Image (tube, helix red, strand yellow):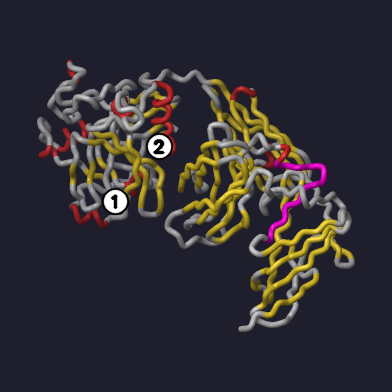
Amino acid sequence: MKKITLFLFLIFALNNIQALENGITLRFTANHNDYYSELDSIIVENITQEVSSVLYYPDTVLPLIPTNIDIIEANNNRLYVSQNYPNPFREKTNIDIYAPGRDLFNIAIYDMTGRKLLSHEITLEQGIHHFTFFACNKPNYILNVTSDNYSQKKLMIQIGEGKRSSSEIAYRGSSAQNNTHQAMPRADFPYEPGDKFKFTGFITDKHDNSFYNIKTDVPKSDNIYVFDIKSYTLTIKAEPEEGGNVFGSGTYQEGDKTDIYAEAKGNYEFINWAGDTEHVDDPDSKNTFVTMPANDISITANFEDYDYPDDGEPGDGVTDIDGNEYATVWINRTEWMAENLHVTRYKDGTDILGGLSADEWKNTKDGAYAIYPHSHMECIDSEEGVVEAYGKLYNWHAVDNKKGLCPEGWRLPSDDEWSQLVEYLKKSYDLHNELDNPDIEGVGNALKSCLQVNSPVGGQCATNKHPRWNEHDTHYGTDDFNFSALPGAGRSMAGNYGGIGSFGTYWSATETCPLYAWHIIIDFEHGAVGRFGNLKEFGWSVRCIKD
């Protein structure tokens, strides 16, 4: 159909008038008979200050700040992460990041349970950088942008469910430091509360010549809009101040919902939020949300100093529902199991499927465990002996079961927690994965049990009996932290067994997409700790951590 350009006077909906620091954001949309229609351009005039600006599709967002404020200039020494736009969104949305200087940033997306859906590392130069997020089938997301120097979070809300099986984030380029962008505050188009605005828009119409109707809550008189948006201050504090970092302070409108976050430092632990907590969703959660009232409020994160055991010190141990007892160990303020799990029941007493044939294993979507065949091992002649040596192998459906695989008060470590363990050991003990420095003992070697065929450590560490690692004269286990990682191998999706003595693979609680989940692997030929995503039907070992 022939395109007809319509001249429309003051007929655009002001959709989503949003507080931004001490300013507001105008988002323009048009509709015809309740259906979305594509804008061509919009002329925005501040009649009071006699300035105007033209927006061209798809840039139909105009952030405004008072004439005496320039947020970018005032904050050019810290990170700025815009709220995603549009928000709420369907399937994809945009994000802008202002980097105050050249830095390596990690852009991570989490679902509302805290599971990491994706992680993207990128070095950003000083200036404004633009990204597009493509959502999967989750309704809501948390965006977390971090570097060694900065951290910011945003809540993103999806309408309906996305069609993608996994999430993705794409880099769309950058703007120079002194440039402006649709999602950043603009000093070149100022306003003051009470200024009068006029909007004139153009639409390329494919249907008819009828006018488009709008509704708006913005007060108007004689086709002139007057803005006088009230905002209130949210102050976030830490008690004691050295106990941790807190995030979320800012200026918001009544009814705005914003996330707040507390991050403990050193030996401190987050306890709870105090102050105006009637506006806090969950005062006991370090990452929660505040609904802003029509007044200034102050919220304090309480931290408590805790005397954690040294790395490698034994923990109190733990017993599962079957009565199996496990040794535990402290590393990086976390108590880990020092043995592989071999429970046969969930926490609620329900049996976990076991004894499955290869075909049954391949086809089941229920939680299941397997026992590596003892015929592959020297000096072990029973399933009980295998379980005592290496534990059981579980598919991820058992790991993720809501009935609970780990003992009461314990849980599966997330992908982040496995990564934090590795990074902590690398930084704190100068342990590098072999790709970083082939001459330095790796994190994997330090976590391995010293039991190995002809181990250079000697003594009881040198053994041919299982459990033990295959022989290697460079990457042998030293068990520096009493973690005692063992090569329990695995069961493939097809139901086949392999790798006993060669590698130990441990599930995380984090899926990469509906079909895959993250796990770490330690093997006898390398000093590194590997990280991979694999199909949930594989059978791997499990280590739990204390809540």
Distance, label 2 to label 1, CA atoms, is: 19 Å
Q: What are the residue bounds of the magenta stretch?
A: 60-72
Which numbered disc, 2 or 1, marks the residue that appears first in the sequence?
A: 2
Q: Position of residue 511 (x, y in %)?
A: 40, 48
The three-letter code of the residue at mark 1 reads: Glu
Residue 543 point in image, percent of width and height? 33, 34
Tell me the residue at 10%/32% (across/down): 378
Q: Which residue is mark 2?
A: 413
Label 2, residues with CA under 10 Å away: few <14, some 14-19, many ≥20: many
State the mark number for residue 20: none
Residue occupying the point 34% across, 25% down: 328
Kindly indicate the quadrant of the structure image that contains residue 282.
top right
Task: Pick whichever, 176 or 227, lies toward us.
Answer: 176
| Mark 1 lies on residue | 537
Q: Residues within 10 Å of mark 1 (few under 14, many from 20)?
A: many
Q: In the picture provided, is 451 more to the left or to the right than 69?
A: left
Residue 13 on the magenta span: no
**Relative to 244, residue 286 above or below:** below
Image position, residue 186 (x, y; %): 73, 49
Residue 64 on the magenta segment: yes
| Local SS, label 2 | loop
Question: Element at badge 1?
Answer: loop
Q: Amino acid at mark 2?
A: Pro
